Image (tube, grey):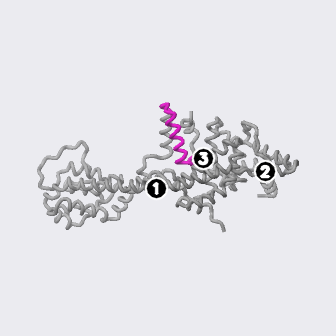
Amino acid sequence: MSVPDEQLMLAYAGGDAAAFETLYGRHKGGLFRFILRSVKARGEAEELFQEIWIRVVEARSRYQPQAKFATWLYTIAHHRLVDHWRARGLAVVSLDDEDCPLPEPAAGPSWDPQATAEARETLGRLSDAIAALPLAQREAFLLHQEGGLTAAEIAAATGSNEEAAKSRLRYAMNKLREAIGDE
Amino acid sequence: MNEHDDKLSARYRELAREEPPVALDAAILAASRRALGRPSFARRWGAPVSIAAVLMLAVGVTLHMQREEPGVETSEPGPAPAARSPAPIPDARKREATRKAAPAPSAHPAPMPSLPTPQPPMHSPASPPPTAESAAAGALEGKPMEAPVPAPARAAPAAAAPAATQSAERVQGFAAPKQANQESNRGAVRAPAASADALSQQKPVREERKLLPADPAAELERIARLRDDHRDEEADRALEEFRHRYPAYRIPNAVWERVRPR
């Protein structure tokens, strides 16, 4: 049975570098995709990704396992993203605006070269639809998919209430299902 | 999750599974190892600050005791131990003021300098001077505490013993006498070491946090003042530092408008 994330983080705070490597290995992919699909520019995503992990490293001695490690990690990521959007003139209000259009078109992630053309098309639609989601809905969806967070944990990570998080997640999923023709 | 959600999740998982570049992995892991080699601020400075605090306290207590000695030694030994009542004394500063303002119950007829502060009502003029250790600890703790009760026998031999011996003895007594003192001493010594970490944890206010001057809101206010003063570079650095120290702190919009990079 694998060691829980929270214990790994405590072990790292206690000086165990290998614990951090395990923790990093578990969460790097999800966190990276969460950021990449939020900001869409790979260079910015990499920069933010590094900053977030550095903050985790620096906050190690203050870490208290009061919630899931993933919730804590994605809370840090959320705050960093909010700062990022704010610095680019995107008010946080737009985070909560369910119908706010996105400020820029989706660049889209790179595609799996092995996929069939039809599947690529569907996935392309899905990717575009994710990129076209309002910020708050997209964030809720990505936190759910990449971070494995529940609605309550999404609410905790984003500083909203559970009902709002549930609502955002539901709206996002409905739109994405519609986009891939799975209604 | 219902069936629709499962399908959507499955589709989503078919999207490219981007990973961070290997070089970035290496940089982050190297930073994580370096950080362990370089202890955090609290760990790095905790022990030296604690030692310095203890030393300063000990020196302060010793000097205070030495200043006090003539009064204690030349006074009549009888009333002094008797007057050292174990009753709680509310404030070390008040006691200090009282000690200076009130005529000591000794044979010293020298006129005391008049103080502008009124005499605290809690003390009778017959109150003995407070012990230095209680005054020092109380002042650091910033809250009322009980006066320590030294052994009555200590006052009498103290008159005959050399001053240095007495001071050492009292410093030892400082560490021992009562639970309340031990608690307050620990708090006083621990507080500086705990400063960096205690602030960012959004936990119930602990005793040492009362001693800490900064909190996230105060820090943000400081950054806002820097912005107001057009010291943007400093403000940028402070904001960056703030984000490092309080990564999970949610900055209210109104505050953000005041502190955001210009």
Which residue is drawn at the image coordinates 66% and 57% (left, top)?
A25
Q: Secondary structure at mark 1?
A: helix
Which residue is drawn at the image coordinates 57% and 49% (left, top)?
A55
Left or right: where does residue B235 sit relative to residue A103?
Answer: left
Which image quarter holds the C terminus of chain B? top right
Identify the residue under disc 2.
B15
**Image x and y of residue B35, in percent:** 53, 53
Nearest the camera: A161 or B65? B65
Tell me, yes or no, if residue B108 can be seen here.
yes
Looking at the rendered structure, whether the residues under marks 1 and 3 are on a common chain is answered as no
Is A135 above or below relative to B179?
A: above
Residue farthest top in this picture: B230
Q: Disc 1 to disc 3, how far (Cα)? A: 22 Å
Chain to which the residue tagged by mark 3 belongs: A
In the image, which residues are magenta?
B227-249
Q: Main secondary structure of the magenta part?
A: helix
The amino acid at mark 3 is Glu
Left or right: where does residue A112 sit relative to residue B155?
Answer: right
Asked whether the beta carbons under mark 2 and mark 1 sit within 8 Å of each other, the answer is: no
Chain to which the residue tagged by mark 2 belongs: B
The amino acid at mark 2 is Leu
Identify the residue under disc 3.
A51
**Image x and y of residue A169, in percent:** 73, 50
Residue B76 tag number: none
Q: Earlier in the sequence, mark 2 or mark 1?
A: 2
**Image x and y of residue B45, in percent:** 42, 53
Identify the residue under disc 1.
B43
Q: Residues within 10 Å of mark 1 (few under 14, many from 20)?
A: some
Nearest the camera: A183 or A76? A76
